[in-house]
Every structure is written in structure tokens, then in C-alpha cells.
Image (cartoon, rainbow, N blue to C red):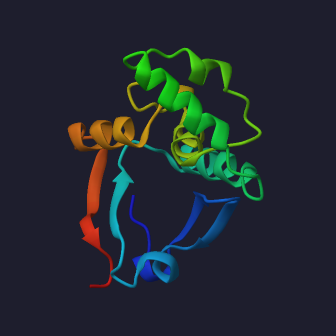
Amino acid sequence: MEGGPLETAVIVEALATVKRHSLWKRYGSGRHEVAVFRPLNLTTDEVAKVVAKAETYVGRRYGYFKIVAHWLDWLLQGAYVFRRLARQDRYPICSWVVAHAFAAAGKHFGVEPGAATPDDIWDFVTAHPDRYREAVALGPLGA
């Protein structure tokens, strides 16, 4: 499965509110480090499910309490306690959007979607080159 050029890529990202915007306009200045992975194990129907789920978050406010829940679980050496309590879908964070969007297509990153951290997602995609191809190595875009 191939996409178009990065300059035209549109992403859904959890900021203060979840927004849909141009990857290149936001990160193409070379000031941010970005990595891009392409899933190799999604059918066209599954891609549509991932996109549709991600789109449901657009316009929602960021889930700051979920960050606190991640931190509290970190204090418990990674136990999935507080994140399970904060699992309401109404206020997403970045890893929540990614993990739940892929879960809509039956794909997971080695942990429950509500427990996924950016590190969990990174570790999973880099450990599974049969499922995810690194399209752009971690570094500044457009530099």
C-alpha cells in the first residue's frame, strides 16, 4: 500500500483539541523530529476503518487527565490501573487516537489500546518490519 507524497499528507493529531491538518505545513520546517511508518498489513477496508475512527476525534478537547493517569501508572511500574479508569473516549491524547483508530481495524500495538503510550507504539512498529515499513526515518522533515 503506497500513499502520496509527504507534502500532501493529512494527519489527525491530538493537540489542545484534536485537529486534522497538513503534516508538511506543521512539521516540514525542519524544527521537529518526525518518523513516518506505513502499515503493510491493512486492507483497503481496514484503512477506511482506521481513518474513520481517527476522524471521530477531530474537534474534541485534549485528555490532560489521561496524561496524569499514564504518570500514575508509571509510578505503579506500568500497571494498567489509572489508564483503565480514564478510558472514556471523550477526551483523547495522541497515543489514544492512534491506538484506538488501529483497534477499529483489529490491529494493536502489543498492549490494550487504552494503555498504549507513544513508546509502546514506537517499540511495536520498529520491532515488526513485516507489518510496518519506515517511510521516513526519525529526523527533521524538510531539512
Could you tell me which residue is drawn at 77 percent across and 39 percent down?
90
Q: Is residue 48 left or right of residue 115?
A: right
The quarter of the picture where the N terminus appears is bottom left
Q: In this view, does 112 lie to the left or right of 127?
A: right
Q: Examine the rendered structure and indicate whether residue 110 appears above or below residue 121.
A: above
Residue 105: x, y in percent? 56, 36
38 and 124: which is toward the camera: 124
Q: Position of residue 19 (x, y in %)?
A: 67, 64
Which residue does the image show at 41% across and 76% down from the upper left? Answer: 6
Q: In this orientation, does residue 12 appear? A: yes
Please identify the quarter of the rendering in which residue 120 is found.
top left
Q: Which residue is drawn at 35% across and 40% down?
A: 119
Question: At x 39% / y 64%, what residue is drawn?
Answer: 2
Q: Position of residue 140 (x, y in %)?
A: 29, 75
Quarter occupied by the C terminus: bottom left
- Residues 41 and 33: in front is 33
